[in-house]
């Protein structure tokens, strides 16, 4: 197979093959979440760059076989590891169209379609989360880059408060940037601070206990000690071990009183605001200066997708603008989203975001989040009921933090060892999938429920598998 042009006739059969294979794959989402032998299959993917290509159909067929034999069924209903989502039917189909249309949604001129759908999607998301309509926003590749984007706006604001344009001259002449948060701060926010030149070490984690809960008095004292110097506060809406929240309303009060920037990381927790049942957990977010969330988690759109919102949109434009003679200037009517975030040329991820919100609407997302809240409570209740299981934190949102704890066993080191082993067995077993963490010093499980497909059957199996495997370990 020489020039790809020779393969022009293969477009239709290649896409038809991909459809058949995708459907075959999706029918296996309930199966072993890590197919047996997957790593051996992958180890055989090697060899030099082919001198002679195999042709489109052969390549797609080979890839499909590889996927079926080795892909982690992470978009299935029993994948409770990390906090990942699946892909709604509308989002999946829309994502295929994003590839088929191959829009560069960085510049309005190259894709009015991508730009318009991004504008509308961002407005719908602001509405879903009860955020002010005037806020600016941009889609990103995920929450890490959304944190980066929003914190770049914060950094710019902070520089302006010192009379310095940091995007022009950098940070070198300035003192360290004070960043205040709780022990709940996500490692991706630290990574974003590192990428911004603010540094991971600039964060003061003001915790009042070993779980990392915010010490509000310490935050107030730190802000007072700064004597009016500007600071960035990072509030966490949904921490990853137990799904807990910082007291955002109290942090907003302090930020307001002391003139600090309040940033909220709501990578999944922002979705609490999609239902009155949980909205109180994330009360006060609308008073922040910036807030971010993920698309590929609870929105259930494909990787990669996140979004950042900033109260003052001009900060985004000034931090991320591009200047080249051939590029059009940014305008309100014809926005260049590549001038408002870190990526310049960018995938039209608005297509999947728009399609899923168009397909299910506010009611659909509220119903899904409420179903997940109920499933979480169901798991927590089953954990409390089982004598061998111990609930380690109140299940406020969509994560159940618990461990295996046979009655009478009191040696903490032995319990940690037991739970570490059990965690590895769960992954090996593959009927359900979730990992271990360390919560308050103890090895613990933290299954998260964010997949649109997950039902009672799936979460009941989660508890059954832990009990069954735990009993084999303890005799
Ligand atoms: C997942 C997560 C992130 C990082 O998100 P990516 O999409 O992996 O970049 C940031 N913050 C929180 C609270 C998260 O749960």
Image (cartoon, helix red, strand yellow):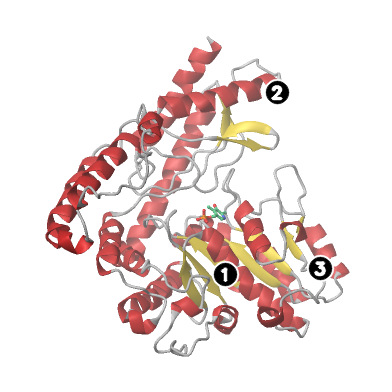
Assess whether mark 2 and mark 1 are in contact (beta carbons under 8 angstroms): no
377 or 66, which is in the foreground?
Answer: 66
Q: Kindly identify which numbered label has been placed on residue 344.
A: none
In this view of the protein, can residue 285 be seen by the observer?
no
Reading the chain from its start, which is encountered first: label 2 or label 3? Answer: 3
Seen in the image, is 281 located left or right of residue 129? right
How far apart in space, not on screen, are marks 2 and 3 (Cα)? Answer: 38 Å
238 or 420, which is in the foreground?
Answer: 420
Q: Quadrant of residue 351?
A: bottom left
Residue at 35%, 41% in the rendered image: 77
The picture places residue 150, in percent across and down from the top left corner, at 59, 70
Seen in the image, is 365 located left or right of residue 193? left
Hey, which residue is sitting farthest front in the picture? 51
Q: Which residue is mark 2?
A: 412
Depicted 432 relative to depicted 293: above or below: above
Depicted 124 relative to depicted 28: above or below: below
Assess whether mark 3 and mark 2 are in contact (beta carbons under 8 angstroms): no
Residue at 68%, 60% in the rendered image: 194
Crowd rating for badge 2 (residues with CA inside 10 Å; few <14, some 14–19, many 20+): few
Q: Quadrant of residue 365?
A: bottom left
Element under label 3? helix
The picture places residue 131, in percent across and down from the top left corner, at 51, 73
Q: Which residue is mark 1?
A: 149
The picture places residue 39, in percent across and down from the top left corner, at 41, 31
174 or 262, which is in the foreground?
Answer: 174
Hey, which residue is sitting farthest top in the picture? 475
Q: Which residue is mark 3?
A: 223
Mark 1 C-beta closer than 8 Å to ligand 1: no
Question: Ligand 1: which quarter?
Answer: bottom right
How far apart in space, not on screen, are marks 3 and 1 (Cα)? Answer: 24 Å
């Amino acid at each position: 197979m020489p020039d790809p042009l020779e393969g022009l006739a293969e477009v239709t059969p290649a896409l038809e093959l991909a459809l058949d294979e995708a459907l075959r794959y999706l029918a296996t989402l309930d199966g072993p979440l890590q197919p047996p032998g997957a790593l051996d299959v992958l180890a055989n993917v090697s060899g030099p760059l082919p001198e002679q290509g195999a042709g489109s159909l052969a390549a797609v067929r080979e890839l499909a076989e590889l996927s079926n034999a080795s892909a982690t069924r992470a978009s299935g209903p029993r994948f409770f590891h990390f906090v990942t989502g699946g892909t709604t039917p509308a989002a999946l189909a829309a994502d295929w169209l994003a590839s088929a249309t191959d829009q560069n949604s960085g510049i309005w001129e190259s894709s009015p379609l991508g730009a318009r759908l991004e504008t509308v999607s961002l407005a719908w998301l602001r509405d879903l989360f009860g955020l002010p309509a005037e806020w600016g926003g941009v889609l990103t590749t995920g929450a890490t880059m959304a944190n980066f984007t929003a914190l770049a706006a914060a950094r710019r604001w902070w520089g302006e408060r010192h009379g310095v344009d940091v995007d022009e001259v950098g940070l070198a002449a300035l003192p360290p940037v004070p960043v205040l948060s709780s022990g709940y701060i996500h490692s991706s926010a630290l990574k974003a601070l590192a990428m911004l030149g603010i540094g991971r070490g600039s964060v003061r984690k003001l915790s009042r206990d070993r779980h990392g809960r915010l010490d509000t008095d310490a935050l107030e004292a730190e802000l007072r000690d700064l004597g009016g110097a500007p600071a960035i506060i990072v509030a966490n809406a949904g921490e990853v071990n137990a799904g807990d929240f910082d007291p955002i309303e109290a942090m907003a009060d302090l930020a307001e009183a002391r003139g600090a920037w309040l940033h909220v990381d709501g990578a999944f927790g922002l979705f609490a605001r999609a239902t009155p049942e949980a909205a109180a957990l994330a009360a006060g977010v609308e008073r922040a200066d910036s807030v971010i969330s993920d698309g590929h988690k609870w929105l259930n759109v494909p990787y990669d997708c996140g979004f950042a919102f900033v109260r003052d949109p001009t900060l985004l434009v000034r931090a991320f603008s591009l200047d080249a003679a051939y590029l059009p200037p940014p305008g309100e009517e014809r926005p260049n989203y590549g001038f408002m975030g870190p990526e310049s040329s960018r995938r039209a991820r608005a297509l999947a975001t728009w399609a899923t919100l168009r397909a299910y609407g506010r009611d659909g997302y509220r119903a899904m989040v409420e179903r997940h809240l109920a499933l979480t409570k169901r798991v927590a209740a089953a954990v409390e009921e089982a004598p061998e299981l111990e609930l380690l934190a109140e299940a406020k949102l969509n994560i159940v933090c618990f461990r295996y704890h046979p009655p009478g066993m009191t040696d903490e080191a032995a319990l940690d060892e037991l739970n570490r082993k059990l965690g590895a067995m769960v992954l090996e077993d593959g009927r359900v999938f979730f990992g271990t963490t360390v919560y308050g010093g103890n090895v613990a499980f933290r299954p998260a429920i964010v997949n649109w497909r997950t039902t009672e059957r799936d979460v009941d199996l989660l508890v059954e598998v832990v009990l069954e495997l735990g009993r084999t370990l303890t005799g």
